[in-house]
Structure formats: structure tokens, C-alpha cells
Image: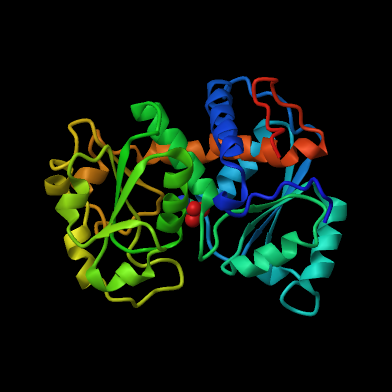
Amino acid sequence: MGKNVRHFIDLDDVPPETLKAILSHAHELKKQKFNPPQIFHGLSLAMVFDKRSTRTRMSFEIAMKQLGGHTVVMNMEEMQLGGSESIESTANVLSRYVDGIMLRMSDQAMMVELSKHTQIPVINGMTNESHPCQIMADMLTIEEKLGPIEGKKVAWFGDSNNVSNTFIQASKIFGFELVLALPEDLHGKVPAGADVTADAKAAAKDADVLVTDTWVSLGQEGKTIEKFQPYQVNADLMTTAKDNAIFMHCLPIHEWEEVSEEVAKSPASVIYDEAENRLHAQKAILAWCLEEAGVSVQDSFDFADE
Ligand code: CP
């Protein structure tokens, strides 16, 4: 691996000041959405998926193309990887064709292993452990709706999963309060140090943001969901939060399990802004990752802190 390769696999691997600079850049790139700077001219991104996707696939592809770059998309089952070809060989070969790789891959350890053999950045488009690109988009969304994220109260409801794990990391990096309301028997699944309760109303009290995710993630089909019912984000829970509280969900929603239709379609719901912000946040993530490949960003976004 080249010494200056900038991977974006886990929020905890990137310096906090760099993540804050990426977030600032995302705000700027969103302002330029009708006049996007062609900073990825001549650069290519490979996108590899082992699971379904709408937002990740579309937003990375459009992010690259709006800023002048190219994409190549493959499903893992179409590749030699997982068949006869090793991770190391695949990493070396892709490094000769493209300037970055975005992977949606269940196994984060496999993604990390691949990143050790590439000479180009690897970006995590979701694993079973984490979803850092989603959370950067969520930080952007909260800031544009409510102002600086620092000091805000975010309440998470339902199950503990890759998205809640990444919210926990983000709360320490960006300085917001995070409470997770989950069934008691799941508290042991939550990473140490997080604030967890079984009391949904206590979590929602005075919250600025209420967020949830599907109770049945990709690959968990058949899971029973009765115990999650008290954690549905509904109008009763929303009234416990601050008057201007917003509702967030990374999508897709399982209609209408983890959130009521009333809340998902209410003025407090920012789910489609959140989905749009995948595009802007990922432009900034790509710009940081690809800077070593020649991307020049504005002087005000000085990422050179590593
Ligand atoms: N939120 C999210 O990652 O959406 P997709 O699964 O559609 O990419």
C-alpha cells in the first residue's frame, strides 16, 4: 500500500479534524450543486456490491459524474474475487485501472484486507459493522436543518446495527449527545460506553433528532419484530421531543414498522433531504480520498493534517 493512500472505511480511522473539514466541504459542494467544480476530471471509481442498493449506487455514480469523473459498477458475484482470485490480486489489478474503489461488502475485515493491498483509496459503502458515508450525510442533514451538530441530542430507536454503531462513533467525533432506546436484551450488543436505555420516551425527551432504521436488515429476513414495537417512532414519541425536532431514517423504510406513516410523511421528516445528502457528503469524501490522485480542492479545505 502506498503511504499516502487515504481510505474511508471507518470513522475512527480518520482524524476528527479531517472529518470536520470533509463535512464543511460537503456544505460548500451542496451550494455548488448546479455548477459543480470538475475536480474529478479524468478519474475513475470502481463500485463493487455484494448486496442490493439504491442510494449508495446512485449517489456515488452521480457524485463522480457531476464532478467530471467516471464509474465502473460490478456485482461481486460477477467478479473472480471469491472464486479463484485472491483479495491481494484483485486489489493490485483494480489499482492499475481506477483511482478509487467503493465497496458494499458484508465483511468489513475483508474490506480492510483488500485496502492493505491497494495503491488507491477504498471507501466503505456499508458493511455489517459500519456505514460511515451514511453518517456523514446525516451530519450534513442535521447541520443544515438545525445548525451546528455539536451539543445536539440525537435519540436512536429500535435495533443495534451498523448504522447505530457509526452514530456512536460520530457522537464522540462531532460532540453530540446520543441515546439509544433498544429492547433490554439487546443492550449487550451495543459498543461499550454508549448511553443505552429500554425507555423510548426517556430517550426522546428533549431530543433534537429522532432516528431509526429497519428492524430487519438485509440478510435477516424471517427475524421476529414484536419486541421492537415499543420503539416505533410515532406521533406520541415525536411530541416528547423538542418542538422543532426532526425525524431521520437512512432508508429504505419497512412500511410502517419502525416508523409510523404519519411521522415519515410529516413536516418533521427530513428523509429525502437525508437521501439527497448522500450525494453531497460523498463528493466531499471522494475529494479527500482522491486528493493524492490530483484532485485540487479549495484552499479553505485544508485536509493536510495527517
Ligand atoms: N441508506 C442506504 O445505504 O441505502 P441503499 O441500501 O439503497 O444504498
Find residue 132 and report its horizontal and vertical position in percent: 53, 50
* Residue furthest front in the image: 193
- Closer-to-camera residue (156/31): 156
Q: Quadrant of residue 283?
A: top right
The residue under the point 37% across, 26% down is 147
The reply, left or right, for residue 254 in relation to residue 201 is right
Q: Quadrant of residue 23?
A: top right
Q: Quadrant of residue 218?
A: bottom left
* Quadrant placement of the C terminus: top right
Vertical relation: 204 (above or below) 83: above
The residue under the point 80% across, 62% down is 117
Vertical relation: 199 (above or below) 300: below
* Residue furthest right in the image: 96
Find residue 28 and report its horizontal and vertical position in percent: 56, 23
The residue under the point 33% across, 76% down is 223
* Quadrant placement of the N terminus: bottom right
The reply, left or right, for residue 294 in relation to residue 150 is right
- Closer-to-camera residue (181/43): 181
Find residue 256 and report its horizontal and vertical position in percent: 24, 57
The residue under the point 16% across, 48% down is 237
Find residue 58 and report its horizontal and vertical position in percent: 57, 46
- Closer-to-camera residue (52/101): 101
